[in-house]
Image: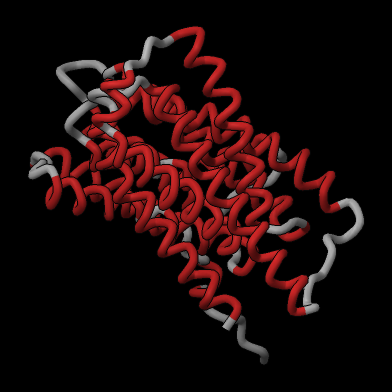
Amino acid sequence: MRKSSGLVCCLLAALFWGTTFVAQDVAAKTIPAFTFLALRSFVGAGALLAVFLVKDHINKKRGTFVPPKKGAHKRTLIGGTFCGLFLCAASALQQLGIAGNTGSPGKDAFITALYIVFVPAFGLLLGKRAAPHIYGCVAVALGGLWLLCMNGSTLTTGDVQLIICSVLFACQMLLVDHIGDSVDAVRLSAMQFFVVGVVSTVFAIILEEPTVAGVLTGWWTVLYAGIFSSAVAYTLQIVGQQRTPAALASLVLSLESVVAVIASMIALRLYPTGTEVLGMVLIFAAIIVSQIPWRTFKKPKTVE
């Protein structure tokens, strides 16, 4: 039951993340990247703050309130700060990449989903060997990425930004997997978004000149991304990873790319080319195969 509920949490997170690519694509036309990231992050942090304050108040009235374990506040503060820094860098590059590739939210989502293939590569750097088929999956995913991203003869700046963003998202997921079990999911999520909001605000002040008219034009994108993608989906990610093995959770979360393609076709009438479809198929196939525990299919040894 615990495992199945974790999978449901990951599936819902993928649904919200996938549909948010459409909102981000629309927002990029009127709201600068860091400004959008700061606004959605503060909306998300505020929503989560309200959730755990109301939850604590209700539990106290019922007499069921359980104080956080010793050291939990410190772990939440430190873990939320590091998760927030990685999430800020990843989200900023994602929004910049989407702004540079306006009109292709499905493609952007598939590039972002490459985080699932980067994880075994990081394992090598940490001295942990992955199964041989993982490296084949990486090669296939890179081939799919080539078909998906090539514009003429070179990658676009937006494509490169999204590739780097997928690496940083992989780091954020590994951090969540490492500290998620020892802290409250809602508080950790709120802390990381507060950090993202503060850092993004600093960069927005230094680098951007947002307009009130631009923000008001895209107000619904800020609310959708802040509430559903930030507050709800990232909390579901943490809860899902607490209840589901990391490999299985990341596979379900990667479905955000499929949702994004479907959402962009429905909402924006954007249809991928045949070459782009082939690239997406290769990447998604690599994602799926990379998560299959092939040792399960090995023929058991017979005892004579």
Residue 104 against residue 173 in the figure, above or below: above
Between residue 242 and residue 76, name the one nearer to us. 76
Q: Residue at x 27, y 47 (%)?
A: 282
x, y percent for residue 197: 55, 30
x, y percent for residue 98: 30, 29
Q: Residue at x 38, y 10 (%)?
A: 209
Total numbered labels: 0
Q: Quadrant of residue 185?
A: bottom right
Q: Residue at x 76, y 47 (%)?
A: 76
Between residue 185 and residue 86, name the one nearer to us. 185
Asked if residue 68 lies left or right of residue 100, the reply is right
Q: Residue at x 49, y 74 (%)?
A: 297
x, y percent for residue 35: 42, 23
Q: Quadrant of residue 150?
A: top left
Asked if residue 38 lies left or right of residue 62, the reply is left
Name the quadrant of the C terminus: bottom right
